[in-house]
Image: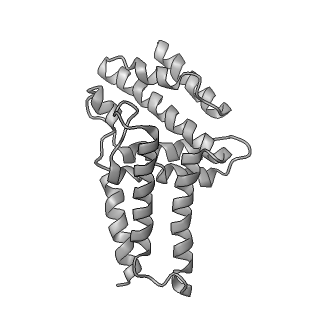
């Protein structure tokens, strides 16, 4: 078994934690059976697949959806109400991403032909996370919209299923959607919420 395989398995164990990490906002609002970070990321990927936005690379968006929250496997799901500044949250998550890169590349010959493509994949994973955090591309802007949209869709589902009101989640996204696709989907959620 190769060192690379060992590194990947160690990294995937961190990713596996996201399947059990409950999203803090739902826990704080005492919803029953709150979604996990991994389930949130999964539906974001599906939403990306359905996007008709012109001028964006959907495949890149799907990948970005899969990596945008992986740092939470180390730092947890830090919400705006956690008392942690945006800068501190960013620094904690960036540090987690640097740990992942070091873990994935630990003790492998990065210049060898057999590891060349793997090193590129690791670099892409880090780049996708940075791109999302910086909102530096149309793909990142769409994925940020999808992130916010998935939250209000989930809030609607909880309201429907648990006879509760989650107004703060809807208010927090008010006027923040940038892409036509997500604006349209959000309108559909607001329409269904009125029923």
Is residue 4 shown to the viewer in this render? yes
Q: Position of residue 119 (x, y in %)?
A: 53, 74
Which quarter of the picture shows residue 135?
Answer: top right
> In terms of depth relative to the viewer, which is nearer, 36 or 75?
75
Residue 77 location, quadrant: top left
Residue 35 coordinates in the image, percent (x, y):
34, 38
Farthest residue toward the top? 194
Quadrant where the N terminus sits is: bottom left
x and y percent of residue 166 in the render?
38, 20
User: Which residue sits furthest bottom?
Assistant: 112
Q: Is residue 63 visible?
A: no
Above-or-below relation of 144 to 161: below
Say which residue appears at 44% left-offset and 62% top-offset: 98
Q: Is residue 160 above or below residue 135?
A: above
Looking at the picture, how far across and down is residue 27, in whole percent? 28, 32
- Give 59 or 22, whichever is nearer the viewer: 22
Q: Residue furthest right?
A: 55
Q: Is residue 129 or residue 49 the one in the foreground?
A: 129
Task: Give left or right: position of 135 versus 162.
Answer: right
Question: What residue appears at the point 54 percent right and 38 percent down from the top-left corner?
Answer: 146
Residue at the (26%, 27%) spot, across then down: 30
Q: Is residue 133 above or below residue 149?
A: below
């Amino acid at each position: 078994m190769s060192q690379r395989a060992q590194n990947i398995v160690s990294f995937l164990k961190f990713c596996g934690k996201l399947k059990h990490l409950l999203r803090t906002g739902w826990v704080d609002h005492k919803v029953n059976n709150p979604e996990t970070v991994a389930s949130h990321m999964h539906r974001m990927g599906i939403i990306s697949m359905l996007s008709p936005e012109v001028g964006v690379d959907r495949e890149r968006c799907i990948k970005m959806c899969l990596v945008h929250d992986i740092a939470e496997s180390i730092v947890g799901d830090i919400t705006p109400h956690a008392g942690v500044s945006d800068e501190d949250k960013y620094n904690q998550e960036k540090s987690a991403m640097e740990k992942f890169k070091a873990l994935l590349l630990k003790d492998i010959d990065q210049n060898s032909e057999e590891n060349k493509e793997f090193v590129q994949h690791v670099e892409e994973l880090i780049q996708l996370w940075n791109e999302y955090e910086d909102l530096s591309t149309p793909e990142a802007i769409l994925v940020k919209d999808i992130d916010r949209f998935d939250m209000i869709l989930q809030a609607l589902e909880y309201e429907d299923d648990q006879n509760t009101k989650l107004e703060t989640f809807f208010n927090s996204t008010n006027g923040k959607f940038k892409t036509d696709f997500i604006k349209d989907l959000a309108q559909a959620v607001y329409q269904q919420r009125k029923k």
